[in-house]
Image (cartoon, helix red, strand yellow):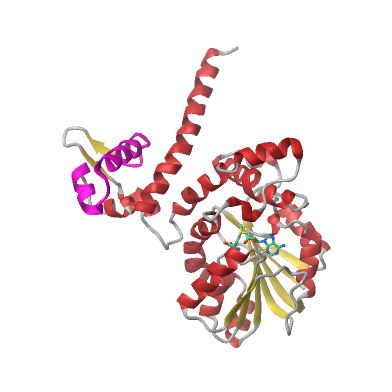
Amino acid sequence: MNKDRIKTFADRVYRDVSGAMVTGMADIGTRTGLFRAMAGQGAMSVGDLTAATGLQARYVQEWLAGMTAAEYLEYDPEAETFTLPDEHAYLLASEGTDHFAGGLFRFAPVLLGVVPQVTEAFTKGGGVHFHEFGGECVPALDLINRGTYDQRFTSYWLAAMPEVMAQLETGVRVLDVGCGAGRVPINIATAFPNSQVVGLDPDASSIRLAETEAAASDVGNISFVCETTRTYAPDAKFDLMTTCDVVHDFAEPEATLAEMHALMKPGGVLFIVEPKAADRLEDNIHPLGAMYYGFSLLHCMTQSLANGGPGLGTCMGPARTEQLVREAGFSDFQTLPIKSMTNAFYMAKA
Ligand SMILES: C[S@@+](CC[C@H](N)C(=O)[O-])C[C@H]1O[C@@H](n2cnc3c(N)ncnc32)[C@H](O)[C@@H]1O
């Protein structure tokens, strides 16, 4: 055995466990408002930050030490002060923007919490159902995506399909399948008041949150249904269907995509957003790939398997996506040239 290789790998193990701990500390930093309180303030002492936040001094002190050790903060040992660099605040204290990382920190503990159940599934089969992830799961998923959806969905992503934009302006019927906490349909309804938008999701807690959010946004041209595409029987078919971060989760992907096709007008457009992963494992060997396989094992894949599904997984990739969409009866499948580090975008016609 190569001793240097053991040492290098031991460092790697410490780094990974450290990363898990940093995730928890960073989540606390966004929940408590500590990052916000430090953003743009320059050097702060424990006393400064405690006074600014009203939080418990000993907790603040240990959190500052941990975040410094993780190199999220800069520390001046002589002055005993801590600084959150502007470039770090850009990701950590930017709630509501498309560059806020806090949702990822919020999601990680939700997933680590089901490790015992997923371990059991390795021997028994099955998996963890969506509703078994606890009350933090839906808000965490919402927090991951909401800034991006608010800032990019209509103005940048949908704008990649100019003919769809024109139809939305005139007024069409839109269905968002797997709407979760509702940010996608709320953004479409807000940007296109002449269109009628429906958000569909079988998860009751997601629909409750979506309805609350829509009421707060004061949009009238939107409604939500807590159903699947199998049971949903609308008065009329849809011109545009969107589905974001959902297709790889389906327990019955072939049947559900065929049901979606049947709910669309002929020639209607299907817009799909999926995690950006390559078709081949060897092309996913990087930090984002490892994060996505973790999301998959501890969430996306397991909740599909729990429902008797194939567990397509977060890294389903473009080739499998295209195959499923075409087999469901859609044509003109295209990958859209929208720039994103984390998402892939597809459209097809009914
Ligand atoms: C990862 S979340 C994405 C939520 C939302 N689209 C977003 O981007 O924030 C996946 C969602 O798909 C929903 N879902 C899973 N299977 C579904 C199905 N067969 N039909 C409709 N929605 C489904 C889940 O309930 C969950 O809300």
> Could you tell me residue 274's position as x and y percent?
64, 57
Q: Is residue 250 above or below residue 151?
A: above
- Determine the image quadrant of residue 70: top left
- State left or right for residue 339 relative to residue 129: left
In this view, the residue in front, 314 or 310, is: 310
Can residue 251 be seen from the camera position used here? yes
Q: Residue at x 60, y 84 (%)?
A: 195
- Determine the image quadrant of residue 203: bottom right
Q: Would you say residue 154 sits in the magenta stretch?
A: no
> Could you tell me residue 88's position as x and y percent?
36, 48
Query: Could you tell me what secondary structure mostly forms the magenta stretch?
Result: helix
> Could you tell me residue 44's position as x and y percent?
21, 45
**Count of numbered tags:** 0
In this view, the residue in front, 180 or 79, is: 180
Q: Residue at x 19, y 36 (%)?
A: 80
- Determine the image quadrant of residue 67: top left
From the image, which quarter does the C terminus lie in?
Answer: bottom right
Q: Quadrant of ligand 1?
A: bottom right
- State left or right for residue 337 relative to residue 83: right
- State left or right for residue 81 relative to residue 306: left
The boundaries of the magenta stretch are: 46-73
Can residue 187 be seen from the camera position used here? no
Q: Residue at x 25, y 37 (%)?
A: 75
> Could you tell me residue 273's position as x and y percent?
63, 61
Q: Is residue 226 above or below residue 41?
A: below
In this view, the residue in front, 51 or 339, is: 51
Q: Would you say residue 72 sits in the magenta stretch?
A: yes
